[in-house]
Image (cartoon, grey):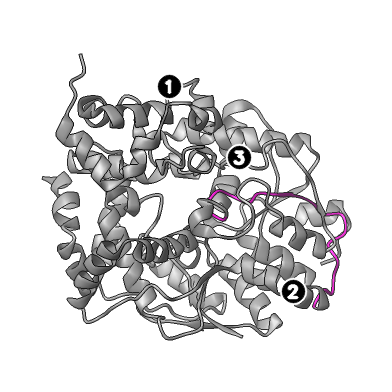
Amino acid sequence: MAYDLFLGCVIPARLPYLEVSSRKIFEKLGIELRDVDGFSCCPDPTGIELIDHETWLTLGARNLSLCDNNGGVVSFCSGCVETLKGVNYFINKDVNAKEQVNKHLKKIGKAYEGKTEVKHFAQVLYENLDKVKKNLEKPLEGFKVAVHYGCHYLRPSEIIKWDDPFEPVTLDEIVKALQAESVDYEQKMECCGNPLEKSDKDLSLQMIDNKLKAIQEAGANCVVVVCPACYQQFEYNQKELNKKNNSEYNIPIFYLSELIALSFGFKPEELGFNFHRIKPSELFESIGFDV
Amino acid sequence: MSVINYEFRNEVLKHNASLSYCYQCSTCSGGCPVALLTEGKYNPRKIIEEAILGLKDKLIESQDPNPWLCSTCQKCVELCPQKVELTEIFTLVKNLCFEEQKFPEAFYSQGKAVFDNGVAIPYSNSIIARRKKLGLPKIKVASVEEIQVLLNETNFDKNILRGTE
């Protein structure tokens, strides 16, 4: 099994330690991820698309044109997945859009037919859940995980075509396969608020505050995410909220790949856990997880 | 008083005919997290209403409600009983706001970064060093010249870089 790897911008250029755990678990599972030269920004479905849809479609199609002959593309980022799936959706739905995009691509000697399959890394993991279970070396006992699906992993379902847009199960099932507990909480399906950072910081903070409050009340001891925008929103804003509201958030945030890597027996040092702002070491100590 | 702009209305309809299916039931606003937090000040139903009526002055010029407060969570589009493609319509509205130079600064910065570097976040020296230390491969991103050929094609530079004039 082999996929082309689409890294995007945020993970490789800002949060490279999340790339480390992601690459390690795929290697361990025997699923090859091929690096491809020459990708641009996906581009951001909460940024560039809102500036100019045609530009977004054209750059996205160019990216996919670079892997047109391979077995499919995998990304570690929900935003990139939404964009690349969205490009396929619009190009296959609207013949004029396809023509227009290809007219642009011709200027750089490229073309895209809209046929490359795109998958979120969590989808590939879910499809290989048996393999994940077989590689389990250290069950994550004591981990009470608040699963945050995030919006773009699921919606618009017409484009994403994966899991249920309001009652998803895939991430919960992966977490449970690691023998961690998935803790239900009231705001589970709410948006983290990250995209609003560009237009209204207060509103963005209010949204993540509400989520963190619900997570704390439900008794979860950590959060798992599958999108670097959600990751930053959860990880970077806890201290700021504490200063602002006298709250006491100190909830470690894990990327799904990090939890899986821990359960496969990788050590925090080799996963770059020291780069986390909220150090997971306190959690490991408090639940007696021997790393 | 608002003025109906038929040309504008037809432009939106031509772009997305699902606009005309809306019967203003407000299911979208009922499920919208931002409408809830702003007590209805941000209101997807109202944006659709203004689009149907062709109220370009409200929608683009005075931005009431402010379309940039959409968190792009895509709940409205899932919930709509009429299958109105709300987020696609909102994207068009925001694209038109950009043409009129009415946008939050952070969007401009992202557009500029992609124009200048091909990526939204250029690789700093410290990140390159950190990647090496973490044992990660070197990343070869798109040629900026090639990206700029495409951005010239879509008039992105004219629309975006206009903001610095």
Q: Residues within 10 Å of mark 2 (few under 14, many from 20)?
A: some
Q: Chain of mark 1?
A: B
Disc sitting over residue A12 in the figure: none
Does the residue at mark 1 contact the one at mark 3 (Cβ under 8 Å)?
A: no
Q: Amino acid at mark 2?
A: Phe
Q: In this rendering, would A244 be left or right of A105?
A: right
Are the numbered discs 3 and 2 placed on the same chain, yes or no?
yes
Q: Whole-Å distance between the Cαs marked 1 and 3?
A: 19 Å
Disc 1, SS? loop
Q: Amino acid at mark 3?
A: Glu
Q: Amino acid at mark 1?
A: Lys
Are the numbered discs 1 and 3 placed on the same chain, yes or no?
no
Q: Residue at x 16, y 64 (%)?
A: B153
Q: Chain of mark 2?
A: A
Question: Which one is in front, A165 or B20?
Answer: B20
Q: Whole-Å distance between the Cαs marked 2 and 1?
A: 48 Å
| Residue B10 at x, y percent in the picture | 20, 38
Q: Which residues are magenta?
A: A135-153
Q: Residue at x 52, y 62 (%)?
A: A77
| Residue A152 at x, y percent in the picture | 52, 53
Q: Whole-Å distance between the Cαs marked 3 and 2?
A: 32 Å
User: B2 above or below B116?
Assistant: above
One can see residue A253 in this view: yes
Are the numbered discs 2 and 1 placed on the same chain, yes or no?
no
Seen from this angle, which residue lies furthest top? B1
Instruction: Give the residue pinned by disc 3.
Output: A190
Disc sitting over residue A266 in the figure: 2
User: A178 above or below A238?
Assistant: below
Q: Residues within 10 Å of mark 3 (few under 14, many from 20)?
A: many
Instruction: Give the residue pinned by disc 1.
Output: B41
Disc 3, SS? loop
